Image: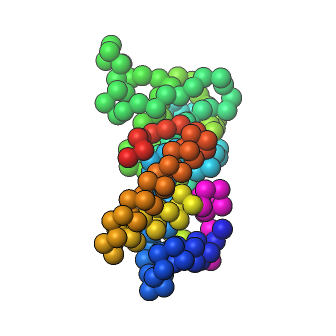
Amino acid sequence: MIASAAVTEILALVKRPDKAAMALQQINRAISLYSLKVEWARDLVETTLTFDAESYTQEIDISTVEARFRKVKYINPIDTTRDIRNVDVTQILGSNGQAQRDVFYIAGTTANIVLSDYAESANIGLYTYPAVLAEADSHWMLDVVPYMIIEKAVSKIFQSIGDDASFRFYEASATELFLAARKDLASSVSESAS
């Protein structure tokens, strides 16, 4: 479903043709909100990083790999079976005071990677922020779970015009759809449904 079709659905439910701009804004807001709440499998982007094959440490600016990256799920060297763990920067030093190996941490848009052995490349999986939609654009949520987005947008419009009963009804319906979609489509849950 393209955004303009969702706007038409929303306007039919709120019966306020003057709210078209707000409807598109609320579609984008709902998609952004739900994208932040869950690590959706459909938001996972996978690509290959090229390393300096003669260094145990790598610094990769992830924004050059994916401009809208949100968080890194994994980084795994291609030529080995070892996994590289994501750690907080404060955990780079182990209990013995030595730098841990086969770990990475994110600082800003840079992935700082410390390897135990040389590697030429690695697979990276990362989650992205959604693009802001214009009326002719679409997003996978509008195709797969359109009423999760539509009913969230409708609830916010009803809230803005002071119709609390309709707001609560559509908010509850959108939440119910979100919980079902999260169970079915998420690669892992990162936050509660609230």
Which residue is pictured at 50% across the width and 49% down the height? 176
Horizontally, residue 28 falls left or right of residue 46, namely left
Horizontally, residue 184 falls left or right of residue 24, namely right
The location of residue 148, given as percent across then percent down, is 54, 57
Q: Is residue 109 above or below residue 75?
A: below
The location of residue 167, given as percent across then percent down, is 38, 64
Camera-nearest residue between 72 and 106: 72
Camera-nearest residue between 14 and 133: 14
The location of residue 194, given as percent across then percent down, is 38, 46
Q: Is residue 146 above or below residue 176?
A: below
Q: Which residue is farthest front?
A: 165
Residue 151 seen by the camera? yes
Residue 58 seen by the camera? no
Which residue is pictured at 33% across the width and 13% down the height? 96
Q: Is residue 87 above or below residue 194?
A: above
Which residue is pictured at 62% across the width and 37% down the height? 122
Q: Which residues are magenta?
A: 135-146
Which residue is pictured at 61% across the width and 56% down the height? 145
The location of residue 3, given as percent across then percent down, is 59, 72
Q: Is residue 127 above or below residue 160?
A: above
Q: Which residue is farthest bottom?
A: 18
The N terminus, quarter of image: bottom right
Q: Which residue is farthest right?
A: 79
Horizontally, residue 185 falls left or right of residue 15, namely right
Camera-nearest residue between 5 and 34: 5
- The quarter of the displayed image where residue 80 is located: top right
